């Protein structure tokens, strides 16, 4: 199985838990011409009234300025690896087993398949763990 594997910067911003909060954040990025590939947003159960949104990629100086102006910051504690490949039954199980076999504890995983392709974002706690994922999955 041939995979495209690369580390990516993930940006995060706090959200108010109210209608339109996410739309405002994403609208600020769209207004600056930022073309996002991945967005995940959720409430913060331990902080009532708030939430968080994670996005990638933010490219270029103009995109970075727009993201910062909208309250986004490049995460320093969340290390993400983007994985893309052909979608086949069991691919997710094989990938996660390979990472488990390396002793990697995932912080999170988000994946989607469209047509014959899948894209996954694997989140880890350290840059060293992210580098292990990249090396392992490039040989996968």
Image (cartoon, helix red, strand yellow):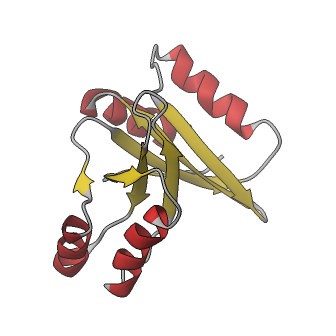
Residue 107 lies, with reference to residue 122, above or below; the image says above
* In this rendering, position of residue 42 left or right of residue 87: left
Q: Visible in this render: residue 139?
A: no
- The image quarter in which residue 79 lies: top left
Rendering coords of residue 123 (x, y %): 43, 37
Question: In front: 95, or 61?
Answer: 61
Rendering coords of residue 51 (x, y %): 43, 45
Residue 21 lies, with reference to residue 13, above or below; the image says below
Question: In front: 140, or 53?
Answer: 53
Question: In front: 20, or 84?
Answer: 20
Instruction: Please give the name of the residue rendered at 71% of the width and 30% of the height, measured from the top-left corner.
Output: 93
* In this rendering, position of residue 112 left or right of residue 60: right
Instruction: Please give the name of the residue rendered at 19% of the width and 65% of the height, measured from the top-left corner.
Output: 68
- The image quarter in which residue 91 lies: top right
Residue 43 lies, with reference to residue 16, above or below; the image says above
Rendering coords of residue 85 (x, y %): 63, 54
* In this rendering, position of residue 104 left or right of residue 12: right
Instruction: Please give the name of the residue rendered at 75% of the width and 52% of the height, measured from the top-left corner.
Output: 87
Q: Visible in this render: residue 68?
A: yes
């Amino acid at each position: 199985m041939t995979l495209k594997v690369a580390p990516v910067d993930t940006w995060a911003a706090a959200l108010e838990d109210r209608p339109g909060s996410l739309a405002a954040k994403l609208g600020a990025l769209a207004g600056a011409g930022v073309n996002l590939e991945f967005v995940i947003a959720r409430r913060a159960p331990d902080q009532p009234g708030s939430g968080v949104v994670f996005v990638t990629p933010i490219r270029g100086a103009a995109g970075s300025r727009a993201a910062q102006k909208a309250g986004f910051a490049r995460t320093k504690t969340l290390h993400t690896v983007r994985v893309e490949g052909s979608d086949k039954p069991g691919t997710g199980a094989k990938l996660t087993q390979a990472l488990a076999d390396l002793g990697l504890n995932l912080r999170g995983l988000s994946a989607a398949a469209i047509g014959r392709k899948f894209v996954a974002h694997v989140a880890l706690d350290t840059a060293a763990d992210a580098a292990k994922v990249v090396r392992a999955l490039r040989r996968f």
